[in-house]
Image (cartoon, grey):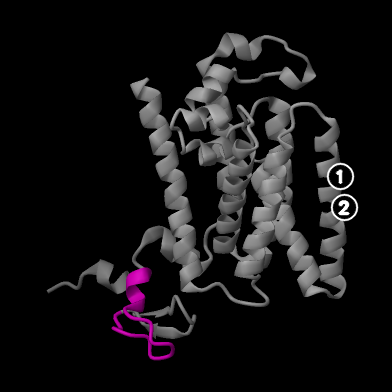
Amino acid sequence: MRPNNLSRLRPTSIPCPNCRKLVSANALECIHCGLKRPGFYGSIPVLRELIRSNISFVDGIILVCFALYALGIALDLPKALAFGGIFGILSPSSEALYKIGMGGRIPWQAGHWWTLITATYLHGGILHILFNMLWLRRIGHWVEELFGVSRFLIIYTLAGLIGSAASTLAGTSFFVGASGAIFGLFGALIYYGRNRGGTFGSAIFRQIAILAVISFGLGLVMPGVDNWGHLGGFVGGLLAAVVLEYEEKKRQTLGMHIAATLALAIVVVCFVLMLINFFLK
């Protein structure tokens, strides 16, 4: 009888998702830390990649943001192409943004609670998305490296959610943008630099603190900036970093990987609800 080729490809041992020590893939319990059925967690696709640190979310978030921006343009092309000043170049219309998940007090009152998440992936113009994605690409990979991929996704999602909630509670009628989540990354890096100390930590702290102060300052003088969202996101990211800690201080645990998987699932569910609402209305 010929052997099953697929069975030969299955690993006989894996790093334990909890303690990272080598254990049999078929073990009922990790002999090092006691985790039940360690091989089970390695069979869940997203969770498996998070455990192995073979995944990055920064570029994926950027891709989703640009795809949704293009969708917003396509839904109301005449208004998007109408020139409305330098900050209005290639701007999706308010009607289009509302359909695909714009956040704010009015959508919340309409029962669109999922917009607390979906709004953080939408942008109101070409300059808006370019600036936000440049910042995300610049500091997002730092947070992934210093905190770990799972903690990055938790911090980013939680900061965006708290920023959206703060803006909604402050009475902002409508808002879009990833800036609340990005300010959360500022908060996480400030905590890292301050807590770690040393030459490297101090350099991170000074650089990010200066950038955060400048960004907050620009928000206060520029029209139409959601400062409540920025403040809420910053506080959310800072607090998340304090609770989760960073990689040098505490390695990512199985619980963190599961929490990141749940965070990703919540984002997906919010967009599914947006699509259902889009096609039903």
Give the side of residue 82 with respect to residue 153, left or right: right
Residue 24 at x, y percent in the picture: 35, 84
Residue 29 in the image, given as x and y percentages of width and height: 33, 85
The crowding category of the residue bearing disc 2, from other C-alpha atoms within 10 Å (few below 14, some 14 to 19, many at least 20), is few
Query: Where's the C terminus, which quadrant?
Result: top left
Give 135 or 23, whichever is nearer the viewer.
135
Specify the segment rendered in magenta.
Answer: 26-41
59 inside magenta stretch = no
Q: Is residue 257 above or below residue 59?
A: below
Residue type, label 1: Ile
Residue ID for mark 2: 210
Dot 1, crowdedness within 10 Å: few (<14), some or many (≥20)? Answer: few
Q: Residue furthest left?
A: 1
Position in image of residue 43 (x %, y %): 34, 66
Label 2 secondary element: helix
Residue type (three-letter) at the residue carrying disc 2: Ile
On screen, 49 above or below 170? below
Q: Which residue is mark 1?
A: 214
Residue 224: where, in percent of width, then height?
Answer: 74, 27
Q: Residue at x 86, y 57 (%)?
A: 207
Secondary structure of the residue carrying numbered label 1:
helix
Residue 27 drawn in magenta: yes
The reply, left or right, for residue 146 in relation to residue 59 is right
Q: Are marks 2 and 1 in contact (CB under 8 Å)?
A: yes
Q: Nearer the viewer, residue 117 or 81?
A: 117
Would you identify the image quadrant in which residue 242 lies? bottom right
Which residue sits at x=60%, y=27%?
174
